[in-house]
Image (tube, grey):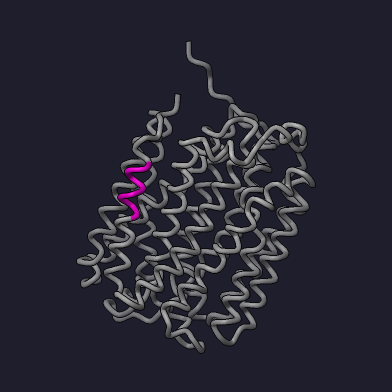
């Protein structure tokens, strides 16, 4: 006889919804830049350099990569709420610096301050504290889905916000989203008992790095966000040129693409959960990314073929963004979840930085087709690395 699925308790439901909302607001603040920054930054000193634009996009990820594990471990020692609040204060401060910036250098500095508030691992550990093992995967999937949804909203809202208030106004919106996240962390997310600190004494960071499946997922999230940011170094300019659009009109492209991609991704997520086909869904999506990126050099000569290719990209991206955090929570050893999530989020941040920096460098020296080919090669490497991932028992 099969065991009935357990329902979330009221406290677990409240914590899951509140932390998903906190994550979504903060990630929306990050994602709002991607769709239009490469075009909007042209009006600033230094904004005509793809290398500097890529550095500005990726700098957030660089400081995130350095700070994820320290913030995660600090939350184990001093509690989740104070560490998350401190990280959000840094995020807001960096956003304000960017809002006052009049050249790309100060935006790069502000982005570095934003990223130093690296709370992803602490928030995920907070969710782990608030949920039982039996329902944690569903709670993690809620967070992953909220990230995918925030990316979809950013693609639609960003061109409208830049068109109405300019790039400085967009950074003020990002600061406001940080304030909303801070309010949720301070007053909405319920207080839950922290994990027993004694359980961390026997944990060595090197032991987490020996878990091969977690390493595969770390490489996966690095690759996913490398590809995401590198593509958005070049695709906004292509869309505006091929479609004869202004940056403020890009929402007309993103809205149908995102709507179609969400409609198409839902059956994939449901099938993976019902059939426990997480490994198969992951491999199919990664293979799909490789195919889409490989076709982009040809598709980028025509507006509608580029839009179709981007729709395929977002179907795979949204599924992977919801699927991978759930897999990490299921595969991580019970006593290593905090450290495992710290390494996972560090890998994600490293992908954000290197995707922006290398994507900008490649675009400047070899053009947009080279960026697409680089992304396709990385997706193929990810597929090979992920092939050894064991199915969930």
In this view of the protein, which residue sits in the foreground, 287 or 180?
A: 287
Residue at (47, 53) in percent of width and height: 148
The answer to whether residue 379 is magenta is yes
User: Which range of residues does the magenta coloring cover?
Assistant: 378-385
- Residues 41 and 303: in front is 41
Q: Position of residue 238 (x, y in %)?
A: 31, 75
In x, y percent, where is residue 123? Answer: 65, 48
- Work out which residue is located at the far top of the displayed protein and give it: 1
Question: Is 151 in front, or is 234?
Answer: 234
Residue drawn at x 66%, y 42% is: 125
Q: Is residue 64 above or below residue 343?
A: below
Q: Is residue 344 magenta?
A: no
Magenta part mainly helix, strand or loop?
helix
Left or right position of 336 against 198: left
Residue at figure coordinates x 67%, y 75% from the top left: 96
Task: Name the quarter where the C terminus is drawn.
Answer: top left
Q: Is residue 298 left or right of residue 38?
A: left
Question: Does residue 233 appear left or right of residue 19 in this picture?
Answer: left
Residue 128's spot in the image, x, y percent? 65, 38
């Amino acid at each position: 006889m099969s065991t009935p699925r357990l329902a979330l308790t009221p406290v677990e439901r409240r914590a899951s919804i509140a932390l998903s909302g906190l994550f979504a607001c903060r990630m929306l603040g990050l994602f709002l830049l991607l769709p239009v920054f490469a075009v909007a930054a042209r009006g600033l000193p230094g904004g005509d350099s793809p290398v500097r634009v890529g550095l500005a996009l990726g700098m957030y990820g660089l400081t995130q990569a350095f700070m994820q594990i320290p913030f995660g471990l600090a939350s184990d020692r001093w509690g989740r709420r104070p560490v998350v609040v401190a990280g959000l204060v840094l995020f807001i401060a960096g956003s304000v610096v960017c809002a006052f910036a009049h050249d790309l250098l100060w935006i790069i500095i502000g982005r570095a301050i934003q990223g130093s508030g690296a709370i992803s691992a602490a928030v995920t550990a907070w969710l782990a504290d608030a949920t039982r093992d039996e329902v944690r995967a569903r709670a993690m999937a809620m967070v992953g889905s909220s990230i995918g949804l925030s990316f979809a909203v950013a693609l639609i809202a960003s061109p409208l916000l830049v068109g109405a208030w300019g790039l400085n106004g967009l950074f003020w919106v990002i600061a406001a989203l940080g304030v909303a996240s801070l309010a949720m962390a301070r007053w909405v997310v319920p207080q839950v008992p922290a994990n027993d600190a004694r359980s961390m004494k026997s944990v060595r960071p090197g032991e987490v790095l020996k878990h091969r499946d977690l390493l595969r997922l770390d490489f996966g999230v690095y690759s996913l966000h490398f590809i995401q940011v590198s593509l958005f170094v070049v695709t906004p300019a292509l869309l505006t040129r091929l479609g004869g659009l202004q940056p403020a009109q890009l929402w007309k492209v993103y809205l149908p693409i995102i709507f179609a991609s969400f409609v198409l991704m839902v059956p994939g997520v449901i099938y993976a959960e019902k059939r426990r086909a997480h490994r198969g869904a992951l491999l199919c999506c990664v293979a799909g990314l490789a195919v889409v990126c490989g076709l982009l050099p040809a598709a980028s000569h025509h507006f509608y073929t580029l839009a179709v290719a981007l729709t395929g990209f977002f179907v795979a991206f949204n599924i992977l963004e919801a699927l991978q955090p759930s897999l990490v929570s299921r595969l991580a050893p019970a006593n290593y979840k905090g450290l495992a999530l710290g390494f996972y989020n560090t890998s994600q941040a490293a992908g954000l930085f290197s995707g922006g920096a290398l994507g900008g460098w490649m675009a400047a020296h070899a053009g947009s087709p080279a960026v697409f080919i680089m992304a396709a090669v990385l997706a193929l490497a990810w597929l090979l690395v992920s092939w050894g991932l064991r199915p969930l028992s």
